[in-house]
């Protein structure tokens, strides 16, 4: 199990597993996702603010 978690060659598998776990968690904990939405919106706005200077410079 630790080889799967630490080995770089399994990265696409880990991303897929976490993607599926995230979808399942979103379906079961819908109220929590509504509560956390402002933090996600803030994070996305911060990412958007960083993209323009990185592309410009």
Image: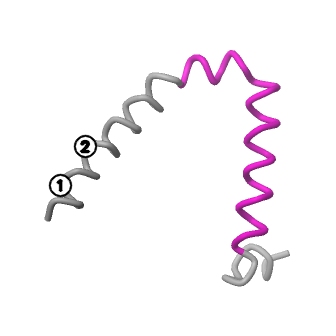
Q: Is residue 1 left or right of residue 53?
A: right
Which corner quadrant holds the N terminus?
bottom right
| Residue at x 73%, y 42% (from the top left corner) | 22
Measuring from the top left, give residue 4's x and y in whole percent: 80, 77
Which corner quadrant holds the C terminus?
bottom left
Measuring from the top left, give residue 49's x and y in whole percent: 25, 43
| Residue at x 79%, y 77% (from the top left corner) | 2
Vertical arrangement, residue 16 with respect to residue 9, above or below: above
Res. 31 image quadrant: top right
Measuring from the top left, give residue 37's x and y in whole percent: 52, 23
Q: Which residues are magenta?
A: 11-36
Q: Is residue 28 left or right of residue 53?
A: right
Look at the image and say whether residue 33 sits in the magenta stretch. yes
**Cβ atoms at labels 2 and 1 below 8 Å apart:** yes
Vertical arrangement, residue 30 with respect to residue 4, above or below: above
Q: Secondary structure at mark 1?
A: helix
Q: Secondary structure at mark 2?
A: helix
**To which residue does mark 2 refer?**
49
How was the colour assigned to the protein in this rendering? Answer: one colour
Q: Magenta region's main secondary structure?
A: helix
| Residue at x 22%, y 50% (from the top left corner) | 52
Measuring from the top left, give residue 46's x and y in whole percent: 31, 40
Res. 10 image quadrant: bottom right
């Amino acid at each position: 199990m630790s080889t799967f978690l630490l080995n770089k060659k399994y990265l696409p598998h880990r991303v897929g597993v976490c993607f599926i776990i995230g979808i399942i968690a979103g379906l079961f904990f819908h109220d929590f996702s509504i509560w956390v939405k402002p933090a996600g919106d803030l994070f996305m706005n911060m990412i958007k603010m960083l993209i323009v200077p990185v592309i410009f410079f």
